[in-house]
Image: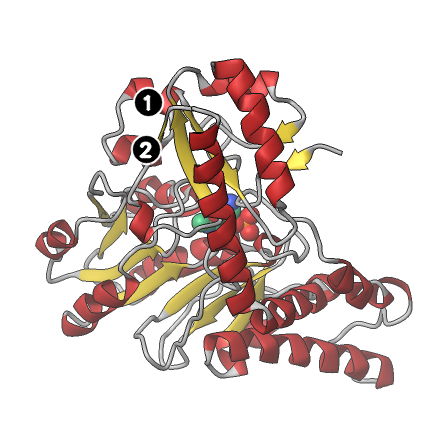
C-alpha cells in the first residue's frame, strides 16, 4: 500500500466508525421515517449522531441538518440566501467571499451574479490570511452574507474567524463558515462566536464519504433546495443516508475524545517534517505563515524540482500538487491569491497528515525526495 499523505483530500475510515456503520446496511435497515419499531430504532441512531455533532459545536441538535457533504452545505446556504431575496421581491443582495474559498463556494459567484446579485472577493495576503481591511472596505448596505473558509484545504492557513464574526455582528451581516478542514480538528464553540451557518464533512475526519452537515442558527431563515418528504425538518428532503450519518456521529465522537492528543501529534509530525527536510538538505519554502497554519496540512515549494515530476516519480507516496478536490484547478487559485510566484507554484506540493501518519513515513519520504532533488 502506498504511503498516504493526502488527508486534506480525504481520510481512511476509522475501523471503529466502519463497525458502527455496518449493521445499518443489513440488520438495522428500516426507514427512519417509518412509524414502526424498525423505523424508531433507526431514528434513535440518527438522533444520537446529531447530538454528537451538536456537542462538538456546542449548539442544539435541531440546528444540525444532515447533507451529502460540505459541497451541498455550501450550496444550500448561498442558494438559500439568493432565494430569500428573490421570493420576497427584494433588491438584489451583495455577497462577500474570500478569494481562497473551496470551489463549492467560489464557483457559486457566477450563479449568484446570474440571479442578479453582486459578489465581491476578499483579497488574501502573502501569509495566506485574508485581508480584513479589504473585507471591511467591501461591505455595502445590502451585504447579506460573508462566507469564509476556516482552515484552507490547500495551505492549512487558519483564518481569523473570530475577527470576521465581530465584523459581521457589528454590520448585521450573516456569516457562513466552511469548516470542512476544521471540524473534528480544532475546538469550535458556537456559543462564543457568532456564526450563522457552518459546513462540515465526515470524510475529512475518518468518516465515510457522501455525508456531511450544515449548522444553521435556529433564528436564521433557510430555504430548502431539495424538495420532497420533508426530512431534516424540511430543510433537506430525501431518505437519510443512515449508515453515513451513523459514521459521521461516530467519527465526531472519536475526534472529540482525542482532539488535544491529535493536535499535539500533528505538531510533532509537522516539526519532524521540517527537521527531516533540513537534515536531507532539501531546499524548500513553506507557502503561507507557519505560525498560523494547521500542522496537519503542509504546502511547500521544493526548490530543485517541479511538483508534476515529484508526484510521478514518487508514486509510492500519495500527495498532491494542488487541491485534489478541484480537478483541473492548476495552477492553484489559492497560491495565486497569495501572490506566490508561478515558478514556485509549479514546485509546490501538499503533504497532509492524519492520526495514522508515522514519523517513519515522513523520514522515508524525505530520504527519497532528497535522492531525486539533490
Ligand atoms: N470545503 C473544503 C474546505 C474542502 O476541503 C472540501 C473537500 N475537499 C469541500 C468543501 C467539499 O467537501 P465534500 O467533499 O464533502 O463535498
Q: Which residue is mark 2?
A: 335
Please give left or right for residue 144 compared with residue 17 in the image.
left
Q: What is the residue that sits farthest to the front in this orientation?
A: 279
Residue 283 in percent (x, y) is at 38, 24
Task: Let me know if residue 225 appears in the view.
Answer: no
Residue 238 in percent (x, y) is at 66, 63
Where is residue 363, by image quadrant?
Answer: top right
Please give left or right for residue 148 compared with residue 64 in the image.
left
Q: Nearer the viewer, residue 93 or 200?
A: 200
> Which mark's residue is nearer the viewer, 1 or 2?
1
Task: Let me know if residue 212 appears in the view.
Answer: yes
- Disc 2 is placed on an element classified as helix
Image disc number at residue 161:
none
Q: Residue at horizontal 84%, vertical 85%? A: 36
Q: Residue at horizontal 51%, vertical 68%? A: 260
Query: Does the CB distance between marks 1 and 2 fall below 8 Å?
Result: yes
Dot 2 crowding, Cα within 10 Å, few <14, some 14–19, many 20+: many
Q: Which residue is mark 1?
A: 344
Where is residue 153, by image quadrant?
Answer: top left
Alpha carbon separation for disc pair 1 and 2: 9 Å
Where is residue 250, by image quadrant?
Answer: bottom right
Q: Nearer the viewer, residue 278 or 179?
A: 278
Residue 33 in percent (x, y) is at 73, 76
Please give left or right for residue 122 compared with residue 241 in the image.
left
Residue 163 in percent (x, y) is at 21, 65
Which comes before the other along the chain, label 1 or label 2?
Answer: 2
Dot 1 crowding, Cα within 10 Å, few <14, some 14–19, many 20+: many
Establish if 155 lies above or below 278: below
Q: Residue at horizontal 24%, vertical 43%? A: 127
- Disc 1 is placed on an element classified as helix
Please give left or right for residue 349 compared with residue 88 in the image.
right
Q: What is the residue that sits farthest to the left in this orientation?
A: 137
Amino acid at each position: 500500500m502506498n504511503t498516504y499523505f493526502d488527508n486534506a483530500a480525504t481520510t481512511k475510515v476509522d475501523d471503529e466508525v466502519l463497525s458502527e456503520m455496518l449493521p445499518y446496511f443489513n440488520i438495522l435497515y428500516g426507514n427512519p421515517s417509518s412509524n414502526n419499531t424498525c423505523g424508531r430504532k433507526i431514528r434513535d441512531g440518527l438522533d444520537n449522531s446529531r447530538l454528537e455533532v451538536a456537542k462538538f459545536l456546542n449548539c442544539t441538535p435541531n440546528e444540525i441538518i444532515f447533507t451529502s457533504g460540505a459541497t451541498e452545505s455550501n450550496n444550500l446556504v448561498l442558494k438559500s440566501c439568493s432565494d430569500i431575496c428573490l421570493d420576497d421581491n427584494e433588491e438584489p443582495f451583495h455577497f462577500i467571499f474570500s478569494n481562497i474559498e473551496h470551489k463549492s463556494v467560489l464557483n457559486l459567484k457566477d450563479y449568484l451574479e446570474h440571479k442578479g446579485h453582486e459578489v465581491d472577493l476578499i483579497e488574501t495576503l502573502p501569509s495566506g490570511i485574508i485581508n480584513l481591511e479589504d473585507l471591511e472596505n467591501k461591505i455595502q448596505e445590502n451585504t447579506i452574507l460573508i462566507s469564509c473558509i476556516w482552515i484552507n484545504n490547500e495551505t492549512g492557513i487558519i483564518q481569523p474567524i473570530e475577527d470576521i464574526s465581530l465584523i459581521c455582528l457589528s454590520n448585521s451581516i450573516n456569516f457562513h463558515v466552511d469548516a470542512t478542514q476544521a471540524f473534528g480538528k480544532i475546538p469550535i464553540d458556537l456559543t462564543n462566536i457568532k456564526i450563522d451557518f457552518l459546513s462540515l464533512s465526515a470524510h475529512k475526519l475518518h468518516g465515510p464519504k457522501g455525508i456531511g452537515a450544515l449548522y444553521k442558527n435556529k433564528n436564521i431563515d433557510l430555504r430548502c433546495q431539495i424538495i420532497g418528504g420533508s426530512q431534516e425538518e424540511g430543510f433537506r428532503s430525501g431518505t437519510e443516508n443512515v449508515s453515513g450519518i451513523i459514521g459521521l456521529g461516530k467519527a465526531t465522537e472519536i475526534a472529540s475524545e482525542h482532539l488535544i492528543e491529535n493536535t499535539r501529534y500533528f505538531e510533532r509530525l509537522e516539526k519532524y517534517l521540517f527537521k527531516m527536510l533540513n537534515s536531507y538538505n532539501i531546499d524548500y519554502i513553506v507557502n503561507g505563515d507557519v505560525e498560523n497554519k494547521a500542522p496537519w496540512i503542509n504546502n511547500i515549494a521544493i526548490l530543485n524540482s517541479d511538483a508534476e515530476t515529484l508526484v510521478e516519480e514518487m508514486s509510492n507516496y500519495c500527495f498532491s500538487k494542488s487541491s485534489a478536490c478541484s480537478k483541473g484547478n492548476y495552477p492553484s487559485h489559492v497560491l495565486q491569491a497569495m501572490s506566490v510566484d508561478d515558478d514556485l507554484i509549479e514546485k509546490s506540493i501538499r503533504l497532509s497528515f492524519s492520526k495514522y501518519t508515522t514519523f517513519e513515513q515522513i523520514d522515508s519520504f524525505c530520504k527519497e525526495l532528497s535522492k531525486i532533488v539533490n
